[in-house]
Image: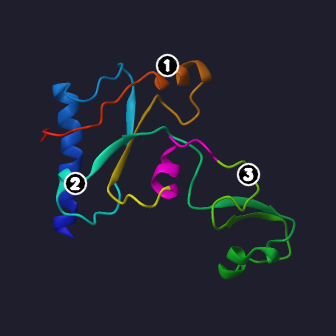
Amino acid sequence: DGAKADTAAAIAVRLVHSLITGVALRIPGKTALNVNIPLITEMDPTAYHFVQTRVGMRGNFDLQAFSSLAASPVAQALGVGVDEPGLSVTVPYGTGGFPEDADPKSEGNVILGGGDDPLVVTVSPLEGTFDVPKKKRQRLDLVDLDLDLEGSV
């Protein structure tokens, strides 16, 4: 609804204001920010707090290779559970056989892993793509976002 959209916009304004004034964030040029605002449950935008994270691999689901899509509950539910090999979604995260993202600073782990803080807004510095070369990742890891925005807009 309109009030929730206004709250989300006010959260974004707090972050942008801190960038413009240099109050809270000091980041090198050519660095982008990936910001995740949660579902709006509290209408006061100052109730939300920012946590510096990094883009990781965790999501709500995994992909899994099946020798027969007939063995995939999701493929069956979508009507494509045929006796042919293929990829299908598996739920919950971690069931697809891929290595789990164990980094506590990963966006997905902060957003989905904790679950006990619905007012957290994640802010991840990144350059260009999710696949940042190790040398650049080390530089991004040196970025220190002071996300305690008390007293900001």
Contact flag, marks 2 and 1 (Cβ < 8 Å): no
Disc number placed over residue 98 in the picture, else none: 3
Image quarter where the C terminus lies is top left
Secondary structure beneath disc 3? loop
Image quarter where the N terminus lies is bottom left
In the picture, residue 131 is in which quadrant?
top right
Q: Residue at x 81, y 77 (%)?
A: 70
- Tell me the amino acid under the disc marked 2: Ala
- Tell me the amino acid under the disc marked 3: Phe
Secondary structure beneath disc 1? helix
Magenta stretch?
101-113
* Residue at the front extreme, as displayed: 116
Disc number placed over residue 149 in the picture, else none: none
- In the rendered image, the vertical position of residue 11 relative to residue 60, given as above or below: above
Indicate which label's residue lies in the foreground, 2 or 1.
2
Q: Residue at x 64, y 68 (%)?
A: 91
The spot of residue 101 in percent (x, y) is 63, 46
Q: CA distance from mark 2 to mark 1?
A: 31 Å
Colouring: rainbow
Left or right, residue 100 beside residue 32? right
Indicate which label's residue lies in the foreground, 3 or 2.
2
Residue with the mark numbered 2: 47
The spot of residue 108 in percent (x, y) is 51, 51
> Can residue 36 be seen in the rendering of this structure?
no
Residue with the mark numbered 1: 139
